[in-house]
Image (tube, rainbow, N blue to C red):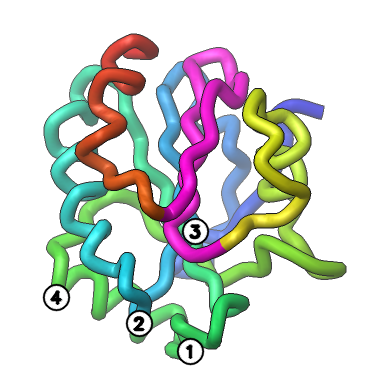
């Protein structure tokens, strides 16, 4: 299985496969609307705006598993991101990143990450950088601000 075999639903409810992003550099992030790291949406949007024409896609996956910091509906999350941070990158439906109901994408990312920082996602806004061939190249904890990823992203573009 590759990352391109994995299906996910956009925040609008459309099921896609990640094959839609084949040939792109992906920055995949589990997000939350009511977290101390929520302002990272601004940095993620800046990265997307700066590098989307060169092949970067930022993919946001809301998750409510960490102290219920994203309790809203998908529509509420979408509106929050747009109104407060001008998010134009693709957001997806809320999902689980840990536990029995972990989404297959997060199983793949954790299993294939070169940084073995744990079997679980530690918190909101953990980030994975995937190259144009679908290989997980790096994993960043929540403390790593999006603007600090610029050099790594440029290398893959």
Figure check: 112 above or below 107 = above
* Residue at the disc numbered 3: 30
Question: How far apart in space, not on screen, are marks 4 and 1 (Cα)?
Answer: 17 Å
Which is nearer the N-term, disc 4 or disc 1? 1
Label disc, if present, on residue 34 of the rendered structure: 2
Toward which corner of the image does residue 75 lie, by quadrant?
Answer: bottom left
Magenta-highlighted residues: 123-142
Q: What crowding class fits label 2: few (fewer than 14 Cα within 10 Å), some (14-19), or many (20 or more)? A: some
Whether 132 is among the magenta residues is: yes
Position of residue 107 measured from the top left corner of the image (x, y, whole percent): 76, 47
Query: Viewer-nearest of labels 4 and 1?
Result: 1
Position of residue 156 measured from the top left corner of the image (x, y, whole percent): 38, 13
Figure check: 5 above or below 127 = above
Question: How far apart in space, not on screen, are marks 4 and 3 (Cα)?
Answer: 19 Å
Label disc, if present, on residue 83 of the rendered structure: 4
Position of residue 151 measured from the top left corner of the image (x, y, whole percent): 26, 19
SS state under label 3: strand
Q: What crowding class fits label 1: few (fewer than 14 Cα within 10 Å), some (14-19), or many (20 or more)? A: some
* Residue at the disc numbered 1: 71
Toward which corner of the image does residue 102 lie, by quadrant?
Answer: bottom right
SS state under label 2: loop
Which is nearer the N-term, disc 4 or disc 3? 3
Label disc, if present, on residue 85 of the rendered structure: none
């Amino acid at each position: 299985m590759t990352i391109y075999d994995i299906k996910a639903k956009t925040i609008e409810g459309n099921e896609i496969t990640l094959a839609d992003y084949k040939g792109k550099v992906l920055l995949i992030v589990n997000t939350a609307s009511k977290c101390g790291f929520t302002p990272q949406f601004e940095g993620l949007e800046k990265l997307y705006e700066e590098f989307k024409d060169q092949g970067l896609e930022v993919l946001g996956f809301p998750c409510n598993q960490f102290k219920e910091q994203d309790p809203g509906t998908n529509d509420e999350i979408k509106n929050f991101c747009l109104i407060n941070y001008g998010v134009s990158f693709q957001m997806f439906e809320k999902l689980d990143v840990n536990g029995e109901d972990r989404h297959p994408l997060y199983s793949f990312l954790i299993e294939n990450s070169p940084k073995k920082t744990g079997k679980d996602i530690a918190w909101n806004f953990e980030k994975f950088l995937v190259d144009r061939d679908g290989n997980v190249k790096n994993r960043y904890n929540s403390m790593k601000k999006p603007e600090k990823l610029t050099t790594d992203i440029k290398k893959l573009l």
